[in-house]
Image (cartoon, rainbow, N blue to C red):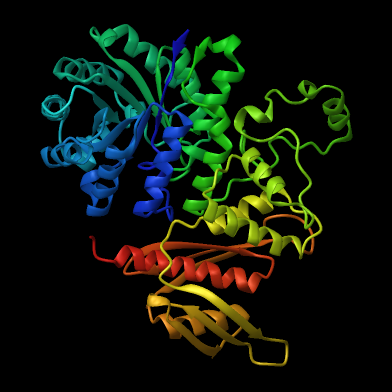
Amino acid sequence: MDKVIIFDTTLRDGEQAAGGMLNFQEKLEIARQLDKLGVDVIEAGFPVSSEGDFEAVKSIATEIGSATVCGLARAHPKDIDRAWEAIKGARRPRIHVFVSASDIQMVHQLKKNRQQVLELARDMVARAKGYTEDIEFSPMDASRADPEFIYEILEAVISAGATTVNIPDTVGYAIPDEFGQLIKGIVEHVPNIERVVISVHCHDDLGLSVAHSREAVRQGARQVECTINGIGERAGNASLEEIVMAIKTRNDFFHLATSVDSRQIYKTSRRVSELTGFAVQPNKAIVGANAFRHQSGIHQDGILKMPKTYEIMDPRTVGIPASSLVMGKLSGRHAFKERLAELGYTLSEDDFHRAFVAFKELADKKKEITDRDIESLVAEELRTVTEVYHLDRLQVTTGDRGVPTAAVRLIGPGDKVLADAALGTGPVDAVYQAINRLVGLPNTLTEFSVKSVTEGIDAIGEVLIRIESDGVTYTGRGADTDIIVASARAYINALNRLLAAKRPAG
């Protein structure tokens, strides 16, 4: 059976999603999980774009054991040299070179003609080949380019040493049949195409990225570039979980396989969502909260008699347990550990102890703890940002006739206890004013959103905020049954991210 190579670009194209910036530790954590998921290639970043991205790619390259680690580079000597410096410590390094190939981008962005772009692509692939054998080339905006020029430039870069040629639908312009014909034309008209793997990279501007990718595979592509939860530039990329599970579920149609351990999909999806701050919509295929939930009486009747009547996938194959333990205040450590294991979490003793204490505190407030409660609780305990400031105590006075007042106590650097109080236009504003007096870090609050993690009056509330400092956005998240406490935790989380980003390297 043929294999489809899964090329994950969550850490590069996924991070380009507006507001989705990840810090060093978060990128490293996601890379480890992607390796555990079993993706074949991890595009770790764009090394020339910043010193931080260079260091993150370099660390990922030296740590990841199984997957190929790829660095992106424009068709420019400095980009290629920098990419190699970042990935040269990888067991399996790859340089990914790209250049615009559509007339609209060549004329208006590059200010070059076709011959100049072809020569540039060929020369830069040859330069990259001087560093490593594994070279990928992408003619950007291929779906809007002249197919004859695509054939010509691919033949040139393959002769120069490219081992993978990636066909991007960069702006999500194509229609599936049209994109499939482009891949078919490449197979038929590029003389040396048998020497390389054909890859595709599709965007979701018209909601067709996964459809394009599947059609390309049907036409001979054997690598698909995708991201966890489909995050990425503008409307996002093809969703990894949808590509993988389509191939797995409809093996009778595709007759193909991937190396992905699908049981790790749900855990990976949740962690990427937590770290990027992008919630997964309930009706999202494969990993959405409603993907394996049934409300219709007819559907429920069928599921009880035979799950396959209304479920084309066993939820356990993507890491969602088919049955649940009812968790509450009488549940012990063993039951809690078993539930964590079923949800895909393996915690150290210290992390488990903190999570269990938090679980028992929550159980005293709620009759029943759901899986989503536990996931939110664990995410709260496993924040990857080093806590320069920690929320110790919070007291708020508010009402329709009083002035909202907040008293806040933080544990700061060196375990120093800091306390202050402030007035505000509302309870959350009062809390943030008090925190600002203690931390003294100028920033602008640009987004504040609240959602209920679970149902009921005793639900956990989750707060997502974004703050801006010096033109850079930082995301913070917090969760608690008290929404004011959750708001404070989210703000402290965002401030700690800001401080981590400003801390001098080394």
Q: Nearer the viewer, residue 115 or 314?
A: 314
Q: Could you tell me residue 184's position as x and y percent? A: 39, 11
Q: Would residue 47 appear left or right of 180 to someone viewing this image? A: left
Q: Relative to 58, is 230 on the left or the right?
A: right
- In the rendered image, residue 284, in percent from the top left (x then y), is placed at 62, 39
Residue at left offset 16%, top offset 40%: 85
Q: Position of residue 231 (x, y in %)?
A: 47, 42
Nearer to the camera, 376 or 428: 376
Picture quadrant of residue 126: top left
Name the residue rendered at 70%, 40% in the picture: 290
x%, y% of residue 119?
A: 11, 26
Q: Is residue 190 above or below residue 269?
A: above
Residue at (25, 43) in percent of width and height: 58
Figure quadrant of the C terminus: bottom left
Q: Is residue 29 above or below residue 328?
A: above
x 76%, y 42%: residue: 325
